[in-house]
Image (tube, rainbow, N blue to C red):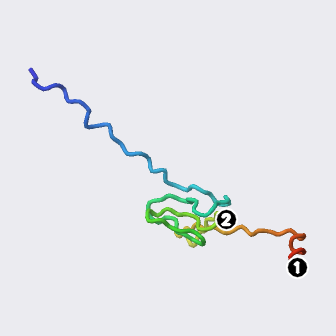
Amino acid sequence: MAHKKAGGSSRNGRDSGPQYRGVKRYAGQVVSAGSILVRQVGSKIKPGKNVGMGRDFTLYAKVDGIVSYEYKGKKRHFASVYPVQTVESPVETAQAVS
């Protein structure tokens, strides 16, 4: 007869949470400074204009603007943010001149 109880599963049942990687803001979307654009492992997409890279390769916007993804060649992908130009009305411009 066995002198030990059947082995339980007390050492099992652990798992880490998901990483939630991928593109967070797509091309054409308006973002504010500090917004996360892409979470990635390694620098698959590189930072372009007005985009910074965190130490975990996260890309974030440095300025308010519109997101754009550019391709240089077949393998080089860049994420950029272009600031939105504010358009003044003709009335405001005329008042500023006079």
Answer with the quarter of the image where residue 68 lies.
Answer: bottom right
Q: Which mark is residue 65?
A: 2
The amino acid on which the numbered mark 2 sits, given as a three-letter code, is Gly
In the displayed structure, would residue 97 be above or below residue 71?
below
Per the image, label 1 sits on a secondary structure element best described as: helix
* Whole-percent x, y for residue 76 in the image: 53, 70
Per the image, label 2 sits on a secondary structure element best described as: strand
* Residue, far top: 1
**Going by the image, does 48 lie left or right of 86?**
left
Q: Earlier in the sequence, mark 2 or mark 1?
A: 2
Residue at screen point 53% across, 63% down: 59
**Going by the image, does 89 lie left or right of 56?**
right
The amino acid on which the numbered mark 1 sits, given as a three-letter code, is Val
In the picture, the quarter occupied by the C terminus is bottom right
Q: Nearer the viewer, mark 2 or mark 1?
A: 1
In the displayed structure, would residue 18 be above or below residue 79?
above
Q: Kindly identify which residue carries mark 1.
A: 97
Q: CA distance from mark 2 to mark 1?
A: 28 Å
